């Protein structure tokens, strides 16, 4: 007699989703699915809007990573205008993206995932959230909040506000980094470095004491995709696309983002609004690949900064080639925070950031283009087709969370198969299933649920509809 467990909604992620776990008549997991239950429609309702409005409109896709859409959209606009933006503008865009990496990764680690790592997967769900962390370790919680604030301040100092800044535009940016803003960033860097060092100590301690989690939290071979450059240094803004396999071997290199349709397909399923991108040469679903922090550190040879390179070397000591455990997304995020802080420290003293030459002026010179940038969660594609007046005729967005969709579903199934057996539900088991999704830090909409106190009802139901067990939160 088959049974079903439903987790609805999944908590401590950005957006709304549910997980369905199917059991056979012996209580063993036969299938698991991660459902995205929201429909946004941005690609459709942007049709007919002017190209130059796209950075401002698409930034509203998300309140956590608006900078990612802002930059990808502006880069698409650059290509449609057929311009090379001024060097200072590119540096400033990179600086804002580094601030975005810091603030988003800090949110993921300290607000969404550290309650599990510090308080325990089986701890009281009423306290297993950022407020419980504040109660248990107020100094650490404050440091996490301050680290995120540091990244947000860089965005605000450049763009005028922390969320949805109207700053990066087709052709460049609207304003430079002021001397006062530069000095403020410099003054706050030491505290940021100290906090990320504490975060490394926490995560390494957890991995040392719970090495088994690495084996079951999304540990399986896949491809990895992301932006790369000829020097094989960590890239977060520009370059070509690279794909490596689960051992780190390069499968495809120097791929042109404009040709993404030749090597990436987008499948759909009737049980989720989230698309299922895959690597076309391998087919669907065998062409499963992952993007984001773990992919980026697996793609590069060096982070390009001394402290982050030391951490990357330690990260790679455990295995040869690519790391396949999705639990290590947490580790990769911390390496990227550290690399971002080091690059920010290098960049802010560059006098070119105060340049007034920040924007290339042009009209509509191409009718189709693709802009790609690395969002904190992974590679982000904006593909626009416009008419002669620059009005959007068609738009396609491939977001990082969608590209991780196949991997998230496989992660849920792997964790569920390990922890769930029989007709009895334990809250800790289900939290581990949710934690497998949180490792990817999925960003499903503008909504955020950092408190982790959303109502949640999980039922174990047999084939005739009888409720065998139930867990309720909230």
Image (cartoon, grey):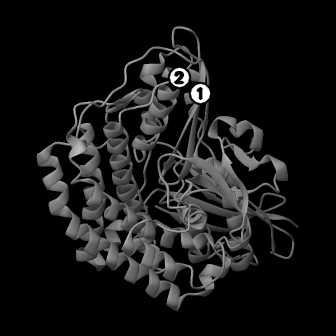
- Residue at image coords 31%, 59%: 148
Look at the image and tell me whether residue 52 can be seen: yes
Specify the quadrant of the image occupied by residue 328.
bottom right
How many other residues sit within 10 Å of disc 2, few (<14), some (14-19) or many (≥20)?
A: many
Which dot marks residue 384? Answer: none
Q: Which residue is mark 1?
A: 369
> Tag on residue 80?
2
Above-or-below relation of 91 to 245: above
The answer to whether residue 30 is left or right of residue 315 is right
Residue 393 in the image, given as x and y percentages of width and height? 61, 16
- Taking the view exactly as shown, the residue that stands out farthest to the bottom is 209
* Dot placed on the residue nearer the N-terminal end, 2 or 1: 2
In this rendered view, identify the residue nearer to me: 80 or 84.
84
Q: Residues within 10 Å of mark 1 (few under 14, many from 20)?
A: many
Residue for point 28% across, 54% down: 347
Kindly report the distance in space between the C-alpha atoms of the residues bearing marks 2 and 1: 6 Å
**Residue 406 is drawn in which quadrant?**
bottom right
Question: In screen coordinates, is 409 left or right of 133?
Answer: right
**Residue 397, relative to residue 27: is it above or below?**
above
């Amino acid at each position: 007699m088959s049974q079903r467990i439903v987790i609805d909604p999944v908590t401590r992620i950005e957006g709304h989703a549910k997980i369905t776990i199917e059991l056979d008549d012996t209580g063993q997991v036969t299938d698991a699915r991660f459902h995205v239950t929201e429909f946004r429609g941005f690609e459709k309702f942007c049709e007919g809007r002017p190209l130059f409005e796209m950075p401002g409109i698409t930034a509203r896709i998300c309140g956590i990573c608006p900078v990612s859409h802002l930059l990808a959209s502006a880069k698409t606009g650059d290509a449609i205008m057929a311009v090379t933006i001024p060097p200072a503008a590119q540096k400033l865009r990179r600086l804002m993206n580094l601030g975005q990496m810091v603030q988003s990764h800090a949110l993921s680690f300290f607000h969404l995932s550290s309650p599990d790592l510090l308080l325990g997967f089986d701890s009281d769900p009423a306290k297993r959230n950022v407020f419980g962390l504040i109660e248990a370790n107020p100094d650490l919680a404050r440091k996490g909040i301050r680290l995120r604030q540091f990244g947000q301040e860089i965005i605000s100092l450049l763009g005028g506000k922390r969320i949805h800044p109207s700053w990066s535009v087709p052709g460049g940016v609207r304003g430079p980094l002021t001397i006062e803003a530069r000095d403020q960033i410099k003054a706050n860097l030491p505290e940021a470095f100290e906090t990320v060092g504490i975060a490394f100590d926490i995560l390494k301690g957890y991995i040392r004491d719970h090495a088994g989690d690495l084996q079951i939290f999304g540990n399986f071979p896949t491809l990895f995709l992301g932006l790369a450059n000829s020097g094989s240094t960590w890239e977060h803004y520009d370059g070509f696309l690279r794909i490596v396999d689960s051992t780190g071997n390069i499968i495809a290199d120097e791929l042109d983002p404009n040709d993404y349709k030749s090597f990436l397909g987008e499948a759909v399923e009737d049980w989720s609004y989230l698309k299922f991108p895959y690597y076309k040469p391998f087919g669907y679903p065998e062409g499963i690949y992952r993007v984001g922090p773990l992919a980026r550190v697996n793609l590069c040879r060096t982070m390009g900064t001394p402290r982050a390179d030391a951490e990357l070397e330690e990260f790679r000591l455990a295995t040869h080639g690519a790391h396949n455990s999705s639990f290590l997304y947490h580790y990769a995020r911390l390496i990227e925070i550290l690399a971002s802080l080091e690059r920010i420290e290098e960049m802010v003293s560059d006098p070119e950031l105060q340049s007034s030459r920040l924007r290339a002026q042009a009209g509509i010179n191409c009718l189709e283009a693709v802009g790609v940038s690395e969002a904190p969660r992974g590679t982000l594609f904006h593909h626009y087709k416009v008419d002669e007046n620059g009005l959007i005729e068609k738009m396609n967005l491939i977001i990082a969370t969608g590209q991780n969709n196949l991997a998230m579903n496989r992660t849920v199934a792997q964790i569920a198969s390990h922890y769930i057996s029989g007709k009895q539900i334990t809250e800790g088991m289900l939290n581990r299933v949710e934690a497998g999704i949180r490792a990817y830090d999925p960003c499903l909409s503008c909504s955020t649920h950092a408190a982790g106190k959303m109502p949640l009802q999980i039922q174990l139901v047999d084939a005739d509809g009888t409720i065998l067990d139930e867990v309720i939160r909230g």
